[in-house]
Image (cartoon, rainbow, N blue to C red):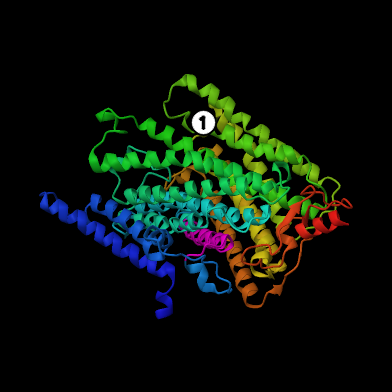
Amino acid sequence: MKNFLSLGLVRGLIAQFIGTLAGGLFITAIRALMGLPAFDKFFFSEPAWVFGGLVGALSFLVGVGAVTDWYKWAKGEPTHEHHDEERRWQRYFGVSLDHKVIGIQYVFTALVLLSVGGLFALIFRTELSQSGLQFLTEEFRIFDQNGLQFYNTLMSLHGMVMIVSILLGIAGMINYLVPMMIGASDMAFPRLNAFSFWVAVPAGVLLLSSMVLGGFDTGWTGYPPLALRAPVGIQMFYLGVWVAGWSSILGGLNLVVTVIRLRAKGMVAFRMPIFVWAAVATSIITLTATQMIGLAFQLVIFERLLGMPFYNAQAGGNPVLFQHLFWFYSHPVVYVFVLPGLGIFSELLPVFARKPLFGYKWIALSSLAIALVGFLVWAHHMFASGMNEYLRVPFMYSTLLVAVPTGVKFFSWVATLWQGKIEFPTPMLFVLGGIVVFLLGGVTGPPHATVSTDLHLHDTYFVVGHFHDTMFGGYIFPFFAALYYWYPKAFGKRLDERLGKLHFWLMTPSFFILTLGMMRIGLLGMRRRIADYDAMLGFDLWHTILTVSAYLIAASILVFFWNVYITAKKGEPATGNIWNSRSPEWQAPSPLPVHNYDKPFEVVGEPYDYGLENAPYIKTIEENEAVSHA
């Protein structure tokens, strides 16, 4: 029990519970003194829950130790590095300043939330398997919600939990890979890096706590005016996303400074690995756009608590304002989801094709172009919202323009594969599968960009199928490719190839059936975000097929988890450059030392000159000095 309580995560969760209770009691006492209603059906009143949730999040950070060093510094006391030389599992459940540990913490948390969000999807997908209410009937009650309200909560939380999971997975890949790829010993601000991760944990708790506080029925977007009359659970939803936003902003700031200041000698911009370019483009978006969703949600919190009429049309507010603020962040964040994944494609294709990456500079600049254009397309989500009609055409053209830099990447990938000596280990399978899935997401995107077709497809299952193609192709497939590829670097063992290929071949066909089926019934008029549909529409068979496909995808994820488990127990050792990669991290031992590189190196060549003789990429400083002396 003592060892359990010594874990930073456990202390933080206990502190969050105590802080939430203390904050709620504080506001309850003030309301009682003012003669206001002090308690509600969820024990605390809504203001008490909001304040208590905020205090609880801050208490978590204190309890886990994420602010301890700053507190010591303020008092003039010495601090230490928190770089654990020993390979103990306990370090992943406490504060560490090692970017590799933090990256693994991000990835582990992302996988947990991915599983939770996927479970939510399986529940409401089972409900949709046939017309009529299967088990979430109106009489069904859980967490003070009837079956239909509970369905709405699960559907809404599925979207946002998966989005937070993706953001954490992206942050995990960036944190783990970028310092190694640029030759740095760590991120520029290690303590800020640890803080950025740990602030996301109480945010996840707040997000999930919305279920037990009445839930909400707004969908993952949290649109008013529905949000203005939803149960108190919507406030925990908003607060959780608001707190999680700090993780994205601070992480983006840290990454940009790291790449600008800590690159190895000789690593000029166009000698950086392509994933670093993708990470920089991603971080620019998170650093500059995340404030918008925080502001949009914060204004709803204030309107519900203080009566400020920002979005209530009857009181002079404008609900369309929320959509502008929300989508100004939420469409660029789609590129946050996919840009690192596209960077993974560009990293791994030359390795397994044994050819130089075609059009390196164009691929690098296309990531920045996508990030830039991504800020100019948000209103294509609002063609049906009643916004001014003269705005539709410019947003239609700017949305279609995104296809240009994205097409640059596709043509470069095809050219890289052309006449290559291609190998097909598990990471390469996920790369090729991801490219095809993302292409399907891309070609189904223009119908949403053009006004005439979007007005018919808006809020149908065609949108759901397109969005899942984009997310799976741009994030899930490259995420698993990265896990299979860099797992030996992190842990010195290689994931089982047979189970990896079973994972791929079970997930990929099932996913194609799922999304193509979604788009088909969407074209036939199936609406999204509904708990039931008319049997006369003839969708029962299709929904049964979609549900079976969803369960097969879940089974494939279980195969991956089983692969990780047996590899940890008795996996094949893999300590060398098992992929024959030119990237700097594969020239060092696996797992890497605490500070990454025992000897500094200098970049002397191009990063993707695979198949070319006498074309080194890096050399240690000692090697270069020896050559110059000779």
Taking depth in this image into account, of 288 and 187 the one nearest to the observer is 187
Taking depth in this image into account, of 419 and 537 the one nearest to the observer is 419
Residue 103 lies in magenta, yes or no? yes
Q: Secondary structure at mark 1?
A: helix
For residue 581, above or below residue 250? below
Taking depth in this image into account, of 337 and 4 the one nearest to the observer is 4
Going by the numbered disc 1, the residue's amino acid type is: His
Residue 443 lies in magenta, yes or no? no
In the rendered image, residue 313, in percent from the top left (x then y), is placed at: 29, 29
Residue 517 appears in the picture as rendered: no
In the rendered image, residue 96, in percent from the top left (x then y), is placed at: 51, 64
For residue 278, above or below residue 127? above
Q: Residue at x 61, y 47 (%)?
A: 261
Q: What's drawn in magenta, residue-wise? A: 95-120
The residue identified by callout 1 is 380
| Quadrant in the picture for residue 440 | top right
| Quadrant in the picture for residue 624 | bottom right
Q: Residue furthest bottom?
A: 1
Q: Residue furthest front?
A: 629
Predominant SS along the magenta part: helix
Residue 194 appears in the picture as rendered: yes
Q: Quadrant of the C terminus?
A: bottom right
